[in-house]
Image: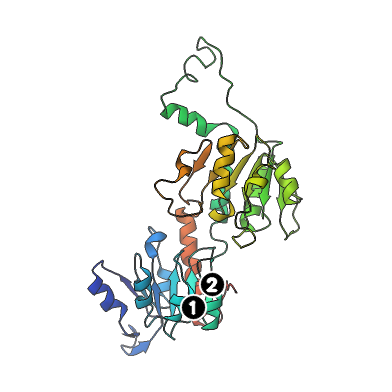
């Protein structure tokens, strides 16, 4: 029978320290005997587990949960733990060097892992795992949400209403006594081209499936070229020149940082839209802002930004034809429960000595 102990920790720091320092001993409900079991610390659960349940993890380990952790608290709370679960917190070499020898693994509760120093973890013999596929459908749906809204100028229509401009509803409508207003683009998706940068992965191919269902032509630039019907593999330069919508799906590496800069934005059609639901720094924001102000492309949507959270005085908030969302692509409840479940499976695999979803330096 598996032991299950879960702590919903109070905000009181004394209570948190007391619970975090508990030994790995508890009585087995079946025999009453003390047994040793693993301890897992979730260092910033509030970023993703609202509305989710951790039963799968609680079946294999003692779970100590913190809503959030500073770097100093992170180091302290690692004491006595076997596995750490984090999401998007910086886990650099200095922090890893202070981890106790008990740490067997770090589980990133997400797909991206550029926040973790993989080399430092490897040198300590610490396995790092991620969750590569939990939000495929959710992110793909968000990409197509942007495409659908751009295709009928929905964002601009709403902006006009918020600004008090109702001309499209009054004199600008058929039968409204004036000339119908056709000053905003309205295009069907069938026959339009969507280009997926690095779109040979799970999310990119999920977008391809949705776009195909709308009758769109799908072109992809990616070194990996899995066998796939209804898509064309092209160079990045051809993709930018041919696409009505450009969606980014590559990971963030040194080679992809600021991939979409001014020269590449200028390769796009003036009627095209850029969508980024991947990693913020892939787009050089200062260049995007400049080109949107010039009208080089028709518009852009960023669900991810170079710096998160976005500074209050960021020029992104006042850039024309730019739509922002606060990194919501992965946040649907069902996606987050998949994230929690797969993270629990990753922990169980580490404790069994057979880690899965391992990322290497």
Mark 2 surroundings within 10 Å by alpha-carbon count, few (fewer than 14), some (14 through 19), many (20 or more): many
**Marker disc for residue 105:** 1
Of residues 259 and 354, the one nearer the viewer is 259
Reply above or below: 256 against 30.
Answer: above
Q: Residue at x 50, y 38 (%)?
A: 319
User: In the rendered structure, are the residues bearing label 2 and label 1 in contact, judged by CB atoms less than 8 Å apart?
Assistant: yes
Q: Position of residue 354 (x, y in %)?
A: 56, 81
Of residues 282 and 125, the one nearer the viewer is 282
Q: What residue does disc 2 label? A: 129
Q: Residue at x 67, y 49 (%)?
A: 196
Q: Position of residue 135 (x, y in %)?
A: 54, 57
Q: CA distance from mark 2 to mark 1?
A: 8 Å
Q: Position of residue 104 (x, y in %)?
A: 48, 82
Is 299 positioned to the left or the right of 227 in the image? left
Q: Quadrant of the C terminus?
A: bottom right
Q: Is residue 353 visible?
A: no
Mark toward the start of the polypeptide (2 vs 1): 1
């Amino acid at each position: 029978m598996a032991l299950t102990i879960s702590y919903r920790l109070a905000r009181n720091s004394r209570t948190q320290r007391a619970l975090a320092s508990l030994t790995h001993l508890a009585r087995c409900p079946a025999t009453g005997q003390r047994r040793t079991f693993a301890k897992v610390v979730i260092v910033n659960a509030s970023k993703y587990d609202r509305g989710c349940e951790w039963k799968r993890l609680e079946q294999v380990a003692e779970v100590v949960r913190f809503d959030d952790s500073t770097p100093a608290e992170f180091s302290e709370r690692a004491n006595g733990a076997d596995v750490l679960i984090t999401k998007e917190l910086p886990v650099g070499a200095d922090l890893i060097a202070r981890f106790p020898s008990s740490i067997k693994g770090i589980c990133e509760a997400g797909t991206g892992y550029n926040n973790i120093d993989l080399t430092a973890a490897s040198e300590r013999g610490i396995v790092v795992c991620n969750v590569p596929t939990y939000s495929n459908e959710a992110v793909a749906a968000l990409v197509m949400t942007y495409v659908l809204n751009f295709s009928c100028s929905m964002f601009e229509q709403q902006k006009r209403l918020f600004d008090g401009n109702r001309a499209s509803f009054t004199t600008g409508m058929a039968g409204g006594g004036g000339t119908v207003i056709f000053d905003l683009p309205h295009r069907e998706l069938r026959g339009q081209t969507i280009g997926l940068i690095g779109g040979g992965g799970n999310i990119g191919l999920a977008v391809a499936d949705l776009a195909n269902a709308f009758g769109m032509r799908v072109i992809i630039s990616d070194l990996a070229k899995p066998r796939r019907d209804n898509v064309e593999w092209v160079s990045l330069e051809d993709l930018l020149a041919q696409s009505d919508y450009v969606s980014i799906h590559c990971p963030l590496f040194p080679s992809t940082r600021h991939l979409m800069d001014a020269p590449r934005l200028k390769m796009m059609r003036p009627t095209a839209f850029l969508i980024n639901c991947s990693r913020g720094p892939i787009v050089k924001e200062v260049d995007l802002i400049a080109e949107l102000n010039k009208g080089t492309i028709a518009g852009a949507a960023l669900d991810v930004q170079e710096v998160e959270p976005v500074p209050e005085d960021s020029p992104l908030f006042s850039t024309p034809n730019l739509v922002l969302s606060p990194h919501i692509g992965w946040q649907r409840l069902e996606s987050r429960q998949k994230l929690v479940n797969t993270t629990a499976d990753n922990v169980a695999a580490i404790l069994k000595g057979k880690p899965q979803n391992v990322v290497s330096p």
